[in-house]
Image (cartoon, helix red, strand yellow):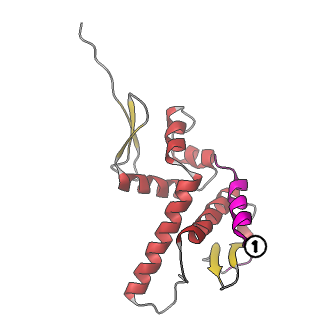
Amino acid sequence: MIETSKLENIISKCGIILEFRTLPDSTLGYYFFDGNYYMILIDDRIRNLEKLYRTVLAEEIGHYRTTIGDITPRKYMCYGDRLEVDKKEVAALRWAVDFLIPTEMLLDAIKNKFVRNLSEMADHFVVTEQFVMHKLEFMARKQSIWKIDDQKSLCLMNLPSVFIYQQTLISNM
């Protein structure tokens, strides 16, 4: 597991101001740059919900790492602007899932039987199940089969179903 302190170290080293505020119901986190300061706002109601807090914080740091300019969705946006906002949201989410759930760590957790299902993956990496599913979706876009060891592979062809394929060796007598 990537420790929460690593996320907090990024905030500290990059000079990002982190504040907890009561945000509108549909908003759990918000990143912005006002020309002078980088700021992340996190909804105060999730401060003590560790999995959700880590997930939202990582995604907001992902905006800092991947986004230039204001991507605040507005009520009346043209289609092209909405597509641009969506692309930047995906880039931030990809950064976040790759940071908190590195692919090699995920494959090692499966190999060593630390995790056997989505819920255990979320517990192991201290993130939400939806966040783990996003990681698997990004992995599936890259390739549908991931080698775990010489006999096992992670198959991501039929998401949301996830399969571990085990090859059996048959010897000739």
The residue lying at 65 percent from left, 65 percent from top is: 57
Q: Position of residue 93 (x, y in %)?
A: 52, 64
Q: Residues within 10 Å of mark 1 (few under 14, many from 20)?
A: some
Q: Is residue 107 magenta?
A: no
Q: Position of residue 69 (x, y in %)?
A: 54, 82
Q: Residue furthest top?
A: 173
Tell me which segment is drawn in magenta. 1-23
Q: Is residue 120 left or right of residue 87?
A: right
Mark 1 element type = strand
Residue at far bottom of view: 76
Q: Is residue 129 visible?
A: no
The residue closer to the viewer here, 164 or 143, is: 143
Residue type, numbered disc 1? Phe
Q: x, y (%) of residue 154?
A: 40, 40
Q: Residue at x 72, y 59 (%)?
A: 9
The answer to whether residue 13 is magenta is yes
Residue at image point 47% right, 93% down = 76
Q: Please tell me whether residue 130 is drawn above or below residue 84 in the rendered image.
A: above
Instruction: Say if 109 sits above or below 132 in the image.
Output: above
Residue that protrudes farthest toward the left in the picture: 172
| The C terminus, quarter of image | top left
Q: How many marks?
A: 1
Q: Nearer the viewer, residue 64 or 60?
A: 64
Could you tell me which residue is drawn at 73 percent across and 55 percent down?
5
Is residue 38 something one can see in this rendering? Answer: yes
Tell me where residue 30 sits by quadrant.
bottom right
Residue 117 is situated, as x and y percent measured from the top left of the image, at 51, 43
Which residue is tagged 1?
Answer: 20
